[in-house]
Amino acid sequence: MFGCLKVVQLESSALPPLATAPTDTQPLPARPENAWIAKAGRPVAGAAGGPLAGLVFAAKDNIDAAGFATTAACPAFAYEPAQSATVVQRLLDAGASLRGKTNLDQFACGLNGTRSPYGPVPNAIAPAYVSGGSSSGSAYVVATGQVDFALGTDTAGSGRVPAGLNNIVGIKPSKGLVSARGVVPAAQSVDCVSIFARTVDVAARVLAAAQGYDAADPYARRLPMATTPLPAAFRFGVPAVLEFCGDALAAHAFAQAVERLRTLGGTAVPIDYAPLAGAAALLYESALVAERYAAVRSFVDQHEDQIVEPVRSILLAGKRYSAADLVEAQTRLRAYGQQAAAIWEDIDVLLVPTAPTHYTVAQMQADPVALNRNLGAYTNFVNLLDYAAISVPSSLRADGLPFGITLIGPCGSDWQLADLGQRYHHATGLAQGATGAPLPPPQPIAALQPAATVDVVVVGAHLSGLPLNGQLTERGAWLVRTDETAPDYRLFALPGTVPPKPGLLRVAPGRGARIAVEVWRMPATAYGSFVALIPSPLGIGTLALADGGTAQGFVCEPLALEGAQDISHFGGWRAFLQARAAAS
């Protein structure tokens, strides 16, 4: 079904001239500088103000940006666009600044990042391994912190595989949601402009600025978007048969991912992956590949010798099919779509590995077709069947390689996927890309209608950065503010608790102190599951705050405090922990 054939063993402000592609026919080494095809000495400034002000981005070099040549990683194809692609212009108008153009698998034909005359792009975490493609450079410059976000394209997974392999976020929007005018097509009817970022929050804000109907794009659509979050208790599909190309570490990482999604309120539902795999196979193994050839037909027919292998062979394969062959392939695709539709009757979202394994650059160069196909085992069907998707980091494996998961939903579910993806990502505790920087607090997805929320006051182990804070963030809670209680409370260190916890007790006026707290806000639908985790003698009650207001928060049964150490004079749990650590 999956076709895995190999097993992994473990400064000038002027705009730059077009980079010169190497001419050596030997396999080129993967170098960090290969990520860029053209880079401005100073970012091209966006409009003053705007929702993306202060953010710097890069664009994959099959997307037009005025002032930069567009090469599609083929120097002989290069041209100077008269204007920027619609998506680039919308981002500039929103205040973002453009740093430059990034490398890619030539003509966006590949999932590995080695099919470029400008050289392979290394993996940002493990440089001996492939970065994934075709949006290789865009993923690398985001993962390494060179830009805040980057545009890619995604026909068969090029906006997801590089995200999964580089520990970053990749949003693959619903088809037609973001204009593709000014994008060199790969297979135009299924092409999408994709977004890479180190956090879901940034990626979602970019999508909000980039989206919009464009009559100049023949495949643009006015899409009805889901504007309410997925239910707190949701059902997620998991392929009943999984393939990891012999990679046991990837299989273990995915099993962990399934368990993590369960902790977020999900119920796993086995699904028949056969119709999805069948649809995926059609992309390159049927007359559908003719659309790849048609996208750059005039250039291919005149400059075949300027195209690298195996891209040339893939494009030329599209010439051998007849119109009748194409109609037959389209009918088969519709049949797979009908079979797949039944899957959604029992699930809210589909969970798959972003990629089944990792390959070194040397392995990929030695076997570029089979291993590339393996990387697309869980991606190729998504656009063909008109789904939305987001890839988010899941873990770093025992060998240090990143593992990502992809959440897939029906067309128009983009914001729901971003919301769940953010909850999942923040539950991992991973750093941002290859930067080592911790994730910032999660932010509400602005396009979702505000759901009912509950404010929860936390005083101990649930404070930011402390051991139980994940019980808040994995439920989509976010920090509203730091605060203090009214001066009517005493704080005690509860003996024998793991992790260590305090108990908060209200006392008579004049006998208490102000205690430092944090106020967190969570969806009301998640509140019940959160309260169910609270062990005796702790509980939830109404707390009086310093400003005279009240909110639900942690309290303790008085009997449990007999003989407990009164730590009120420290002013809060965090200060007590710091003092204890300093004394030890």
Image (tube, rainbow, N blue to C red):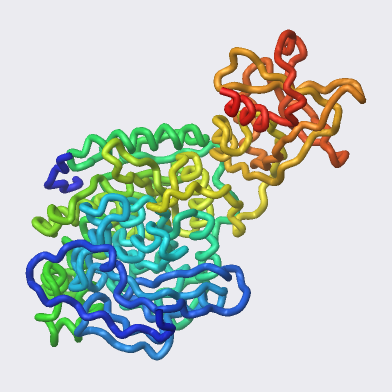
Q: Is residue 234 left or right of residue 191?
A: right
Q: Is residue 259 visible?
A: yes
Q: Is residue 225 left or right of residue 436?
A: right
Q: Nearer the viewer, residue 96 or 583?
A: 583
Residue that extends furthest to the right in the rendered view of this protein: 509
Q: Nearer the viewer, residue 287 or 300?
A: 300
Based on the displayed image, in which of its 4 quarters is residue 485 positioned? top right
Q: Nearer the viewer, residue 44 or 5?
A: 44
Q: Is residue 307 above or below residue 366?
A: below
Q: Is residue 144 above or below residue 341?
A: below
Q: Is residue 331 visible?
A: no
Q: Position of residue 39 (x, y in %)?
A: 36, 76
Quadrant placement of the N terminus: top left
Tell me what residue is drawn at x 51 percent, y 36 percent.
Answer: 264
Q: Position of residue 415 (x, y in %)?
A: 53, 56
Quadrant placement of the C terminus: top right
Residue that extends furthest to the front in the rendered view of this protein: 583
Q: Nearer the viewer, residue 272 or 303?
A: 303
Tell me what residue is drawn at x 40 percent, y 47 percent.
Answer: 393
Q: Position of residue 6 (x, y in %)?
A: 12, 46
Q: Is residue 184 left or right of residue 527?
A: left
